[in-house]
Structures are given as C-alpha cells and as structure tokens.
Image (cartoon, rainbow, N blue to C red):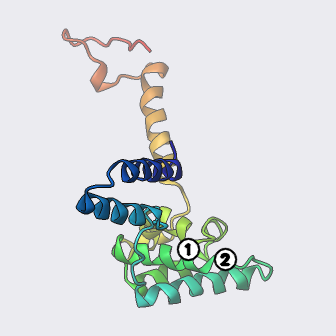
Amino acid sequence: MTDKRKVLHAIEVLKELEIRIVGLEVSLKNLQDLRTLLEKPHSTGDKVKKPLTPGSVMCAEWLHSLIKHRKPNFREPNWPDWYAEMDKIMRIDRRTCEQLHELIGWCQQDSFWQNNILSPSKLRKQLDRLELPTSRDNPALANTKISTSLIVRSERAAEVAIPIIGRSDPRSKSRTGGIRRRRW
C-alpha cells in the first residue's frame, strides 16, 4: 500500500474504534487526537537544506560566466542545483574557493576539459583528475600531453614482445638455467 492509502486506512480504523469505544472518554480523546494527527498533511521526508558556503555561489557563477564567454547561447542553469553542488565540493571534498577558482579557470582554458566540464556536478566528478595536471608540486605534469595510460600500455607491450621475439627475459629462466618459452 502507498503511504496515502495507509493513512486513509488508519483513519478508517480509528473511526471504527471511536464508534465502538464510546464509554471510555480517555481512550476516545486519545483516538481523536491520533485521528487529527493522521488527517494532517505530513511531509514525505524532505531533507533539511543546509546553508550554502559563501564561495559556492561565486564559484558557480564563475564557471557559468566562463562557459557563457565561450558559448553565448549556453542554456541558463538550475542555479539552486549548481550552488548546492559547488557547496558539496567545498564542504565534503574540502576545496577552498581559491582552489576552485584556479581549477575552473584552468579547465575552461584546456581544449579537452572545457568541453567536458559544463556543470558543477561534472566538475565534482572529475575533480581529482583535473587537479593532477594543475598541481603545483609537479609542474612537469601540467605540460604533459601524453596520456599516462598510453605509456603504461607501451611498457606492457614491450614486456610481452620480448618473449615472443625470442630475446632472453631474465624472468623466464627455468630452474636449470635454460631459457623456456612462456605459454600465452
């Protein structure tokens, strides 16, 4: 049964009990109080909204202005959702307004990320990936255009190619010292 049907059923049960228990005034009063409580419209469990952090509005509007600068006909966002998502980035992911301002500026200038980060929810989803190339600790990563996954794949391909070509691989020696071929 749905919640509304449950409430209506409970009201009917209370009406029936009210009719049967006429002699007991205390029980009748309690039943009437319970009935009035059930007849009142009740909330469906809406969450209490937390106040926004001061920088969340500013960062959301900064992201929108940079996107709007590149694409003037960009649709108007749902501002409460944008503010709430920026607030999550600041509260839950523990990023400062300055960090977000720098990160948003960088990602909206990057040719790849500017087309992928078009909302605070996408920014939050890709936050750690975006921070890697912009980290101040390792400036060499900021200029790197080669994907690290390509480097890892090429190293693995070289490892696989060595036994196939027939070169000796120190890991493929048998106990007797001879070279054995790996089975794939």
Q: In which quarter of the image is residue 139?
A: bottom left
Please determine whether, in this image, residue 98 is positioned above or below residue 46. below
Residue 39, percent from left and from top: 47, 63
Using the image as rendered, state which of residue 183 and residue 84 is in the foreground.
84
Query: Which residue is pictured at 49% across the width and 73% down the height?
Result: 85
- Residue 43's place in the image compared with 139, above or below, is above
Residue at 72% x, 85% y is 69
Residue 98, quarter of the rendered image: bottom left
Mark 2, residue position: 77
Q: How far apart are the alpha carbons under marks 1 and 2? A: 8 Å
Residue density around tag 2, few if under 14, some if 14–19, many if 20 or more, within 10 Å: few
- Residue lying furthest left: 175
Q: Residue 152: percent from the left, percent from the top?
A: 45, 44
Of helix, strand and loop, which one carries label 1? helix
Q: Can residue 110 be seen in this view?
A: yes
| In-front residue for pair 160/126 | 126
Q: Is residue 176 above or below residue 78?
A: above
Residue at point 33%, 55% (across, down): 22
Residue 164 placement, left or right of 181: right
Amino acid type of the residue tagged 1 in the rendering: Asp
Q: Residue 125 carries which label?
A: none
Q: Verify CB contact (< 8 Å) between mark 1 and mark 2.
A: yes
Please provide percent x and percent y for residue 179. 31, 13
Label disc, if present, on residue 81 of the rendered structure: 1
| Residue 126 appears in the figure | no
